[in-house]
Amino acid sequence: MRSCMTASTTSTQPARHSSLGLEAYVQVTSPIRRYADLLAHYQLKAYLHGRPLPFTADELNQHIQRCLASGREVGRVVRETERYFVAEYFRQQPRDSLWSGLLLKWINEENRLGVVLLDAIAREMLVKVNAGTTVGSNILLRCASADPGNMFVKLNEVAAGSVVGGGIQSRL
């Protein structure tokens, strides 16, 4: 389902919301949480009270561009922080720990490279899985190595307690 979803957009122009079947849509949450929502609240409140809008379209677009740039940077920092701590978590675990996962899809079926959802950390990771493993299969994994500084984790699929997969060093 996620693969069918499109990224959100922010604009001063009305746009359709296909999933909701609406011709025009505006998202405003708590103005305490997001600066862009605070601007939308100002505009809506002025409109509903019959007052002039506090911002022109050009002024709003300038604010939106700054908000989007800041949001992208925050998102990048959050992703890198999560990657670091996932690798650090695996680095601290005993080497004989086993992790259950679910093969969600293939990235490259010929090379047995797939996306696996790790139950314990609710995170998707790239893993080289054994021949015969099919999408939807539950598999066991062992961490062969973890490097928090480079945000890498190498996982191997295991069977009956021994490593049988080639593993892949995965950038988180």
Image: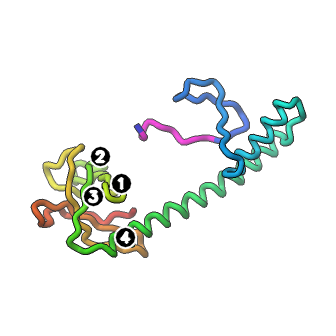
Q: Quickly name the residue at label 2.
A: 104
Q: Do the CB atoms of the residues marked 1 and 2 lie less than 8 Å apart? A: yes
Res 3 quadrant in image: top left
Which one is nearer the viewer's eye here, 126 or 39? 39
Mark 2 vs mark 4: in front:
4
51 and 158: which is toward the camera: 51
Residue at left 61%, top 28%?
A: 16
Whether residues under marks 3 and 1 lie with C-beta atoms below 8 angstroms apart, the answer is no
Residue type of the residue flagged with mark 4: Tyr
Q: Which residue is mark 3?
A: 127
Q: Earlier in the sequence, mark 4 or mark 1?
A: 4
For the residue labelled by badge 2, is the local secondary structure a helix, a strand or a loop?
strand
Q: Amino acid at mark 2?
A: Leu
For disc 4, the marked residue is 89
Mark nearest the camera among 3 and 1 is 1
- Colouring rule applied to residues: rainbow
Can you tell which quarter of the image residue 55 is in?
top right
Q: Please report whichever mark, 3 or 4, sits nearer to the chain's N-terminal start.
A: 4
